Image (cartoon, grey):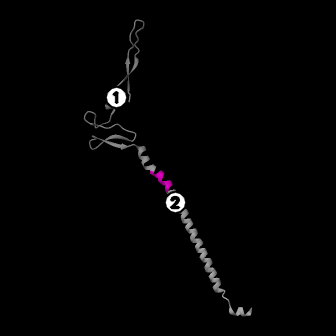
Amino acid sequence: SDSMRLRPTLPPLSNDSIPSTTPMTTFVSLDDSRDRLLNALWCPLRQFGTQCPDPTLISYYSCCGELNNRCCSHLRLYILILIFSLPLLLLVPLIGVLARRAKKALGRRQDAVTQTKYRRGLVLIDQTIEETIEPNEELMELR
């Protein structure tokens, strides 16, 4: 990153100008490598510690260990939320679709069983009626 530091300077004197005591501001850029070393995380201290890698969009680093002399990587919170929520967001609709299909299949199966029982019941009723109304020989003779 381009870091800029402000350094007050006095304007140059010329024959035409009146000397001013108001400082002017100029921008001075620092060396990026030096700036990175100064702003980096050092565990435990910069003088005798280990430099941690730069943080990324996925992870960041902190000092850890018994003496805080090691750099430990940690996942950012939004990455953890994505890791846990994406599978749920994909599984919940899939489970819903499968449950709906299972319910429809079970309903069809129950309808088929009910229709079969109904048909069997009609057959049994017909058989019972035929058995109860056997031709009576005495009635046949009277006709």
Q: Secondary structure at mark 2?
A: helix
User: Which amino acid, by three-letter code, is at mark 2?
Assistant: Ala
Magenta segment range?
A: 87-94
Residue 142 spot, x, y in % from top left: 74, 93
Q: Secondary structure at mark 1?
A: helix
Residue closest to the eye, 2 or 111: 111
- Magenta span main SS: helix
Residue most extreme to the top: 15
**If the image is split into quadrants, where does the C terminus sit?**
bottom right
Q: Which residue is mark 1?
A: 32
- Estimate how packed mark 1 is, as few (under 14), some (14 to 19) or many (20 or more) residues with alpha carbons within 10 Å: few
Residue closest to the eye, 34 or 66: 34
Residue 109 spot, x, y in % from top left: 55, 68
Q: Residue at x 58, y 71 (%)?
A: 114
- On whether residue 120 falls in the magenta region, the answer is no
Q: Which residue is mark 2?
A: 99
